[in-house]
Image (cartoon, helix red, strand yellow):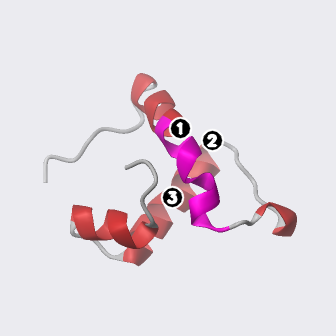
Amino acid sequence: MKGLSNKEIASRLFISTDTVKKHTYNVYRKLGVTLGDGDIAGESFYNPELPGVIAELEQKGLVRESEG
């Protein structure tokens, strides 16, 4: 879901924006990513990085695509 906002992801997956935010937070936490005030730039800033993160999680068996 490269380049999509949380709202767009939520719409495509038929889930709430809060659910997308919760899962994004959990992914970052599991990867040991910590963001300070100086790191917060808005979700669109990080979207280009997400495909790589998702690929890494898939390789490690930590995520799978939902079947609906």
Tell me the residue at 64%/58% (across/down). 45
Q: Height in image: 52 above or below 41?
A: above
- Identify the residue under disc 2: 31
Q: Amino acid at mark 1?
A: Val
Could you tell whether 66 is left or right of 2 in the image?
left
Label 2: how many Cα within 10 Å (few below 14, some 14–19, many 20+): few
The residue to which callout 3 is attached is: 24
Q: Nearer the N terminus, badge 1 or badge 3? A: 3
Q: Dot 3: within a 10 Å radius of its alpha carbon, few (fewer than 14), some, or many (20 or more) residues?
A: some
Q: Quadrant of the C terminus?
A: bottom left
Left or right: where 32 falls relative to 25 = right
Nearer-the-camera pick, 12 or 32: 12
**Amino acid marked by disc 2:** Leu
Judge from the rendering whether residue 19 lies leftward or rightward of residue 30; answer left or right: left
Tell me which amino acid carries mark 3.
Thr
Residue at image point 26% right, 42% down:
65
User: Which residue is disc 1 drawn over?
Assistant: 53
The image position of residue 15, as x and y in percent, is: 27, 71
Q: CA distance from mark 3 to mark 2?
A: 11 Å
Q: Residue at x 76, y 59 (%)?
A: 35
Left or right, 33 with reference to 47? right
Helix, strand or loop for the magenta stretch, by majority? helix
Could you tell which of marks 2 and 1 lies nearer the N-terminus?
A: 2
Mark 1 closeness class: few <14, some 14–19, many ≥20 residues within 10 Å: some
Under circle 3, the secondary element is helix
Give the distance between the C-alpha atoms of the residues marked 2 and 1, in whole angstroms: 9 Å
List the single residue furthest toward the top.
59
